[in-house]
Image (tube, helix red, strand yellow):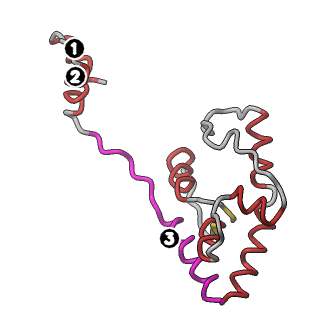
Amino acid sequence: MVFHGADSDIEWLQKDFGLYIVNMFDTHQASRELNLPAFSLAYLLKSYCDIDANKQFQLADWRIRPFPEEYLRYAREDTHYLLYIYDLLRNNLLQKNRQFLNIVYEKSKMICQKLYKKPYFDEDAYQNIYIKSRKTFNVRQLAALKSL
């Protein structure tokens, strides 16, 4: 499996879908290990594939379903060349020194080992909300806030 900049994706996939990723190669980690001038996927696409990346939906909310057609088009364009880039980066790492490839696999493994942790629920958290609201609540309103 090939990702680019998987740090956040790993936790989102766990949190939103219960997916745990193993045996992943992160092209971002490879570009860092190769000390490339930039580490972004846009840079890799331009350098290795002569493609100008469209980043219009990079920060969109990908949890919505069904995906709008423009999200699907963006995702296809964003990942279409990823395996090709992986092959090139892997070969560059091997040419540099096999140890560099091992380092990237180790860093990618460490990213896969990240675990999403549910936020701790504090029974008294409603008091912070109440204080920050700067409103006056009656007893019934405060009880309703606490029950949320």
Tally of numbered tags: 3
In the depicted structure, whether residue 128 falls above or below residue 57: above
Q: Nearer the viewer, residue 137 or 65?
A: 137
Density class for disc 3 (Cα within 10 Å; few <14, some 14-19, many ≥20) is few
Density class for disc 1 (Cα within 10 Å; few <14, some 14-19, many ≥20) is few
Quadrant of the image containing the C terminus: top left
Apparent side of residue 114 relative to residue 108 in the rendered image (left or right): left
Please name the residue that numbered disc 2 is placed on.
130
In the depicted structure, whether residue 144 falls above or below residue 105: above
At x 64% / y 77%, what residue is drawn? 34
Q: Disc 3 vs disc 2: Cβ atoms closer than 8 Å?
A: no
Q: Disc 2 vs disc 1: Cβ atoms closer than 8 Å?
A: yes
Residue interval drawn in magenta? 97-121
In the rendered image, residue 81, in percent from the top left (x then y), is placed at 80, 60
Q: Residue furthest right?
A: 50
At x 76% / y 50%, what residue is drawn? 53
Looking at the image, tell me whether mark 3 or mark 2 is earlier in sequence order.
3
Q: Residue furthest front?
A: 37
Please name the residue that numbered disc 1 is placed on.
135
Alpha-carbon span between mark 3 and mark 2 = 40 Å
Can you tell which mark lies on residue 32?
A: none
**Residue 102 part of the magenta segment:** yes
Secondary structure at numbered mark 3: helix
Q: Residue furthest left?
A: 139
Main SS type for the magenta part?
A: helix
Looking at the image, tell me whether mark 3 or mark 1 is earlier in sequence order.
3
In the rendered image, residue 113, in percent from the top left (x then y), is placed at 49, 66
Please name the residue that numbered disc 3 is placed on.
110
Apparent side of residue 19 relative to residue 88 in the rendered image (left or right): left
The kind of residue on which mark 3 rests is: Met
At x 65% / y 68%, what residue is drawn? 37
